[in-house]
Structure formats: structure tokens, C-alpha cells
């Protein structure tokens, strides 16, 4: 579709990462897919993001088409005027404005290991550049859509910045929280350094317990706050999941909603995936068996008839992988074998590596991320384990289901929104458990095994998983409706 939306909604997404130009985590997948889905609905959605090392080259490799637009954006930052070249390109049909400022955007890892006033400067610049562009350019977005703490400062700037807060016509601010655990907490003095007025230092502003909390400032200043699943929007209002901001969120709960993330169903399609040894889809599942055989060969387990449990993801505390380690012996006693693919916290990597050496007939561990092997694991597994302590949305369970690998997961956040328990519902798509313990994980796997051993029922269960609609279309419609509710003058 063209760029003109009948309702006149224009949206600028401010994001620290955007696939395929830069990617650290799931946020990049969202900002790499949602704007395109919005444009297919007629919303004029565009993106501003840093040109981290390799991003401009990646755009060139993808054949990104140059676009006309402002060539420079300047903001006042840290007591000096900082300018960035702005490269406008079309990526996948979406106009993207790349901030090319090597002094600020030189970190190939995107996020700093230690956050302080200095390492936060790239994100302060990104936030203020998004506001500057939105206010000064002839193309004026009616909505500034911000993502996580890294750009939430833009919402506060529209209210409290000494320059931008005085603008007569300002866009509405929408903040999507991808992970509440990351908040951007800094010394309060940065607000003065970044030209914020007295209002920013108040409870209604950015100040929080004597610090500058950028995410908190985004929550209080935005017109709407969105989490990446309905379940997570409810959980963050509680002390268990609120990460200290539950009081702020409860006070503003009327503007908090949850919209489930989508999945790039073109990239993740077992019928078209070139990385697989054989392709398959519901009704034509021979390729799934071929993928299982290939995975067993890779692990040295040829001919193994029992359940193969796989996990693909980051090895961090949030993902609950300690539960897998704690359940390993009992899962082996059930006749299962495990394939774990991921990198992350060194201690977890070392523990999985040690266990795989100790029990090579039970656990196969890949500690260096290999996309081809990860896709084979998704396709060749029987069960997919995801015991997250909390999960704002989660993409891995969606990928596993699309590839016909039945999830076993904790009933939290987006996992509970995307998986229905096969023992509780006739049209169930997996197996959920409540307690964050190895024992609860084992019990959920035990419940899955009778289904696994009954071929016809298992085939129907896999088909239900594969037929679920995880495309971006429903999410884009929900965001479009939200934008319209903010911009409709009536």
C-alpha cells in the first residue's frame, strides 16, 4: 500500500535496534516487523534508529533504496550542540532514518555493560533526535512510538525539556515496554545536563527515589503505555513482576494495555525454510520426521525413539534455565533427551557444558549460537521447554509451535497468552505449569508423555500448534486502533 493513511495517522518509531540492520534481542524483531505491518494497513509508519557499526553496510547489502529527507539532526546534549548525519533509506518498504554519528554510535554490542551518564548519551541523543525530527521536519508524525527505556526519554522531553516542552504542536507519545527489568537508572544530575526543566525532577516526571529513572519518566509522560502481551500488562501491576514500578503503573493503569507481539512468519516457515533438510506443513509432515532424524544424527543419537526436548534462547536467569539443570536427571529417567542451544551468562554456559560432557547420551549443548542448528532444533524436537521466571511476550514458543514442536512452559506473561494447556482444553496447544521449580517442570513433561505416545492425538496437537496465527497483522490492527484513539479529535 502507499504511505497515505485515510485517517491521517503518521507514526515515527524511535528504537535502539531494528532487524535486520541491528539486532541484540526481541526488540529488534518487533521494530523490524511492526512498522511494515502497519504500513500494509495504510498507516504511514517510519523508523529512526542509530547506525551502529555495520548497520549502514547491511542496508547496502539489502539493496535499501535512498530516500529524500533531512540530512542532519542536531540537539543540545551535555552542554554542547551535537549533530548527526541522517541517512534516509527504505528497508523492506519502510522509511528508516539512520543516525550516523560514530562518536556516539560506535558500540557493536549496542547496549553498554555498565550504564552511567556517559554510556547513556547515545540513547539520550537518539531520544532527543526523534523529538527534534518530529517537531522540525515538514513530515510531522502524529504519534511518536517509543520502545523501552532507551527512547522513553523522548516522551518526557515533550513535557519537560526546556526547548521541546514549549512546542505548541506535539505528537502523542506511545511507549511499548518490552522488558520492565531494564529501566535506565542514572544520577539525577543528567536531567539538568540534558536541558530538562524543574518538572522532570518531580514525582510526576523522571525522578524516582533520588535517581533519574528514564523508563519511569516514559511511563508518566506517555499518552499510552503498551506491554508486549496482555498477560504481562496485568502482571506488572503486581509486586512480583513490577520491578519496583508497580505503584507507578497501578496509578496509571488506565492507560496501560497489552498487545501481543507477532512473529515474522515469512522468515519462520517450516514449509519454506532453506536451513532445514526437509520442509513440511500441516497435512504434509514427512519433512518433520526427516528433521528429527537429522537432529538426532547431529547429537549422535541415531535411532532414539523417545521424546526429544529442545530449548533455544538466551541463557539468562529470566529464562529459568536453572530449572532445566535441576530437572535433568529426572527427565533422563523419563526416557527423554535434551538439546539446548544458547549463549548468555557464563556460569550457566559452563554448567550446561559440564553436564553435556558428563551425560552426552542425555544432553547435547551448543554454546555458540548457530542459526542453522537452532532452526534444526526447532524443527527436529518433539517438545520445546520454556520455564521462564517472567516472560513479557516470548518469540521462541511461537517459533516452536509454528514448527510443530509442542511447548512446555510456565504460565506467565506471553507464554500463558499464546499456549493453552492440552489437558485443560480440547483445542490445547501445549503444557503449562505454575511453580518455578524443577519438580513442576518435570510434572508438566510427564503430562505430555501420554500424548506423545499416542500418534494420532499427537499429530492433531502438533497441527493445532502450527495453525495458530502468530502473524503481525492482528498486532498491527490493535496498534492502529490505539493510534486512532489518540489522534481522533472527537
Image (cartoon, rainbow, N blue to C red):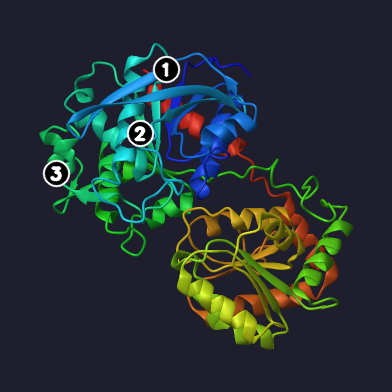
Using residue 217 as the reference point, say whether residue 400 is left or right of it: right
Is residue 359 rendered to the left or right of residue 413? right
Asked whether the residues under the numbered discs 2 and 3 touch, taking CB atoms below 8 Å apart as contact, a structural biologist would say no
Q: Residue furthest left?
A: 198
Question: Label 3 belongs to which residue?
Answer: 189
Cα distance, mark 2 to mark 3? 19 Å
Say how many tags the image has. 3
Mark drawn on residue 126: 2
- Residue 160 vs residue 354: left or right? left
Mark 3: few/some/many CA within 10 Å (<14, 14-19, 20+)? few
Q: Where is residue 225 in the image (x, y as percent from the top left)?
A: 37, 40
Q: Tag 2, which secondary structure?
A: helix
What is the distance, in whole Å, between disc 2 and disc 1 at their CAs? 15 Å
Mark 2 is surrounded, within 10 Å at the Cα level, by few (under 14), some (14 to 19) or many (20 or more) other residues, namely: many
> The residue tagged with tag 3: helix, strand or loop?
helix
Of the 4 image quadrants, the one containing the C terminus is top left
Query: Which residue is disc 1 drawn over?
Result: 71
Amino acid at each position: 500500500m502507499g504511505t497515505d493513511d485515510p485517517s491521517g495517522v503518521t507514526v515515527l518509531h524511535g528504537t535502539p535496534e531494528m532487524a535486520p540492520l541491528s539486532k541484540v534481542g526481541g526488540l529488534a524483531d518487533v521494530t523490524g516487523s511492526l512498522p511494515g505491518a502497519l504500513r500494509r494497513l495504510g498507516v504511514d509508519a517510519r523508523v529512526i534508529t542509530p547506525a551502529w557499526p555495520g548497520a549502514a553496510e547491511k542496508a547496502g547489502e539489502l539493496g535499501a533504496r535512498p530516500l529524500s529527507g533531512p540530512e542532519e539532526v542536531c540537539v543540545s546534549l551535555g552542554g554542547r550542540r551535537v549533530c548527526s548525519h541522517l541517512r534516509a533509506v527504505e528497508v523492506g518498504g519502510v522509511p528508516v532514518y539512520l543516525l550516523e554519528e560514530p562518536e556516539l554510535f560506535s558500540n557493536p554490542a549496542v547496549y553498554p555493560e555498565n550504564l552511567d551518564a556517559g554510556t547513556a548519551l547515545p540513547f539520550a541523543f537518539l531520544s532527543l533526535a526523534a523529538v527534534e525530527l518530529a517537531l522540525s521536519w515538514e513530515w510531522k508524525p502524529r504519534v511518536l512510538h517509543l520502545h523501552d527505556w532507551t527512547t522513553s526519554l523522548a516522551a518526557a522531553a515533550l513535557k519537560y525539556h526546556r526547548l521541546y516542552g514549549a512546542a505548541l504542536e506535539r505528537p502523542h507519545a506511545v511507549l511499548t515496554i518490552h522488558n520492565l527489568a531494564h529501566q535506565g537508572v542514572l544520577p539525577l544530575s543528567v536531567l539538568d545536563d540534558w536541558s530538562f526543566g524543574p518538572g522532570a525532577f518531580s514525582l510526576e516526571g523522571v525522578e524516582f527515589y533520588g535517581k533519574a529513572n528514564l523508563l519511569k519518566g516514559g511511563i508518566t509522560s506517555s499518552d499510552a503505555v503498551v506491554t508486549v502481551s496482555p498477560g504481562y500488562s496485568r502482571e506488572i501491576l503486581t509486586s512480583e513482576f513490577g520491578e519496583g514500578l508497580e505503584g507507578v503503573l497501578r496509578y496509571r493503569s488506565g492507560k496501560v494495555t497489552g498487545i501481543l507481539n507477532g512473529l515474522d512468519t515469512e522468515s519462520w516457515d517450516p514449509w519454506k525454510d532453506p536451513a532445514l533438510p526437509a520442509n513440511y506443513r500441516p497435512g504434509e509432515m514427512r519433512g518433520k520426521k526427516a528433521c528429527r532424524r537429522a537432529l538426532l544424527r547431529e547429537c549422535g543419537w541415531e535411532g532414539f525413539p523417545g521424546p526429544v526436548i529442545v530449548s533455544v534462547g538466551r541463557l539468562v536467569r529470566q529464562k529459568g534455565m536453572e530449572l532445566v539443570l535441576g530437572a535433568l536427571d529426572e527427565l533422563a529417567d523419563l526416557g527423554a533427551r535434551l538439546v539446548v542451544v544458547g549463549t548468555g551468562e557464563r556460569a550457566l554456559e559452563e554448567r550446561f557444558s559440564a553436564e553435556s560432557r558428563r551425560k552426552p547420551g542425555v544432553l547435547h549443548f551448543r554454546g555458540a549460537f548457530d542459526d542453522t542448528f537452532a532452526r534444526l532444533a526447532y524443527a527436529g524436537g518433539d517438545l520445546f521447554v520454556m520455564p521462564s521466571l517472567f516472560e513479557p511476550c516470548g518469540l521462541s514458543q511461537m517459533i516452536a509451535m509454528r514448527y510443530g514442536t509442542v511447548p512446555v512452559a510456565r504460565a506467565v506473561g506471553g507464554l500463558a497468552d499464546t499456549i493453552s494447556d492440552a489437558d485443560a482444553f480440547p483445542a490445547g496447544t501445549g503444557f503449562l505449569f505454575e511453580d518455578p521449580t524443577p519438580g513442576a517442570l518435570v510434572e508438566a513433561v510427564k503430562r505430555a508423555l501420554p500424548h506423545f505416545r499416542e500418534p494420532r492425538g499427537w499429530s492433531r496437537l502438533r497441527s493445532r500448534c502450527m495453525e495458530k496465527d502468530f502473524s503481525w497483522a492482528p498486532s498491527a490492527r490493535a496498534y492502529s486502533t490505539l493510534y486512532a484513539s489518540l489522534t481522533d479529535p472527537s
